[in-house]
Structure formats: structure tokens, C-alpha cells
Image: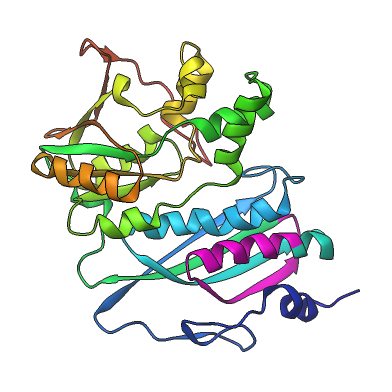
Amino acid sequence: MASEFDLIRRFFTHPCRNAVLGVGDDAALVRPTPGMELAVSSDMLVAGTHFFPDDDPRKLGGKALAVNLSDMAAMGATPRWATLALALPEADEGWLQEFSAGFFDAARKYSVDLIGGDTTRGPLTLCVQIMGEVTAGMALRRSGARPGDEIWVSGHLGDAALALAHLQRRIELAPHDAASCLAALHSPVPRVALGEALVGLAHGMIDVSDGLLADLSHILEASRVAADVDFAALPVSAVLRAHLHGEVARTCLLAGGDDYELCFTAPSSRHEAVMALSRRLDLPLTPIGMIREGEGMRLLDAQGKEMPIGTRGFDHFGAG
């Protein structure tokens, strides 16, 4: 049976392009670019909580890095380095081969070096720490939203949560619809280029990981402002729209999470600049509401009437 160090050498030791010293010593060495600040984040994925134990390991490897890349995007940072800690029930070399291939596919695409980590025996758990760079003083924070800002969101919302509802048999999707939504769940696309481009344009930003209403609420709380959200403006796929009459799909849209889209605020005077960015990146960017003075959030229907919000999003230790 291969040792821990054999597994690290075979599956997780790759040449580093951006680090002074990578995998193989007691610590990695990195040299930040002068004039830049480091952005650092970590996410843990636990089997049975964040993914099914029999999920495709190659897609899981890509997603493990992608959800962390999304955190860099939300700060306007360029991802540079990552560490990976794995708890494994057993040393399944076939699983590790596929998982590491998916991880490094994503790492190469976004020019990220894996510079260290750890492995141990235990319930299947994946923990990635990611580090990126952003021009000093220019990071986009949750606390930057201002009254009069438009609220924007990238891409579409709710498909990943709809896929999970399908897998859990809370809703039934046609095979081709399920395939589309499952791609959103298993292979999220981190909006790194968008995050970088919004530096100097957006005021406040967050990635939508726990549900739109929950994550937008974090911006409101940090910025000490309120918001009106136009339910009819929320960007949805044709699949989700076809089911939007039901409570399951509505909850997926508003509170499902796992979207990894960016929600940001920008002054209304920069509306055309944001639309030009949407065209340049070939990525839908949709205005969904306005920031106002006060506290809290109002969800409004097409007639401007306030709608009940209900569950806001995923909470590991609470009820949303």
C-alpha cells in the first residue's frame, strides 16, 4: 500500500510557476508582487454535506478548487496559490488519480500553483486554502455598497440547487433538463475575469454560495444599507423558469446556493459601463434591484408589492 508521501508525490506534486518553493518541504515560499495585497480564503467540502460520496471524483476535484476561486473573484483578486488538505477513508489510487486530474485541470486554467497541504485518514473531507493578489487598497469588500447603487448578478441563479432537489427527489426534471442543471451543480464556473474587471467599477461584492438572499444580506449588513430586489428581474434559465410556479424552484432561486455567481453593487451612473463589460466578457449581467438607506431587504413582485421572503439560504448551524 502506498504511503502518505507516495500519494502526495504521485498525485499532487507538480512544478510551480508562481512560487519560490512548492510541495515537498515543511512550508511553501511565495513572493507577492510589489504593490499588491494578499487575499486569503479557505473552504471545506464534506461528504454528505456538500457532495455525495459517490460523486464523480474528477468533477469533484475541479469543484473543490472552483469554489475557492470564486472567493478570489468576489474580492477582485487574481488567484495565485493554493493548498489542499484531504481526509480520506482509504487510499483509493483510482479515485485520487481522477480527483487530482480535475483539480489540476482547474489549476492550469486559472494559473494557480498547488504549493502544499496534508493528507490523513478520516471521513472524506476536502479543504482548500487559496491565496491571490489585488492592487493595494482596491479589493472589493462586502462593506462597499452605497445608497443609489444598482444591484447586479452574473449568469443565472438556482440551477445547481434545482439539480440537488432533483437528486433528492424533491422535484422531477426531464433528462435533458437534469443534465443542464447537474452541470451547474458539479462544474461551477468561477467568475474570475469578471471579478478582476469590476475593480474600480463596483462598490461591494460577494459570491453567491449560500443563496442570493442570504449572501446579499451579508452585503447589506456589512454596508449598513437596505435593498429592494425585483423578483421578476432575477436571471433564470429556461429550465428553472418552467418550474417557477412551484415552491421548490422558487426556493432554489432565492435561497438554494451553490451558484458561485457574483452579486455586486455599482453606481447607477455606471450602468452602461457594466453592460459594456457584460458584452466584452460574453457573460449575462443583470440589474436586479437597488440599494437604499435603512435596514433590511424587500422582495418586490412585478407590481411593486412586497413578497414574503421565507428561507434566505443555507446555514450549517441554523435554519437559513
Question: Residue 99 is drawn in which quadrant?
Answer: bottom right
Up the image or down, 211 lies above or below 264; here it is above
Up the image or down, 131 lies above or below 159; here it is below
State the image coordinates of residue 155 (x, y, percent, origin top left). Answer: 39, 39
Total numbered badges shown on the rendered structure: 0
Q: Is residue 198 visible?
A: yes
Q: Is residue 196 left or right of residue 155?
A: left
Give the colour scheme shown: rainbow
Q: Is residue 207 left or right of residue 20?
A: left
Q: Residue drawn 68% across and 22% down? A: 169
Let me know if residue 114 is in the magenta part: yes
Q: Residue drawn 23% across and 59% down? A: 199
State the image coordinates of residue 128 (x, y, percent, origin top left). Answer: 56, 63
Q: Residue drawn 25% across and 13% down? A: 302
State the image coordinates of residue 24 (x, y, percent, origin top left). Answer: 65, 86
Up the image or down, 85 lies above or below 273; here it is below
- Quick one: quadrant of the N terminus? bottom right
Q: Residue drawn 65% across and 52% down? A: 60
Q: Is residue 92 visible?
A: no
State the image coordinates of residue 157 (x, y, percent, origin top left). Answer: 43, 33
Let me know if residue 221 is in the magenta part: no
Query: Which region is colored magenta?
Result: 98-124
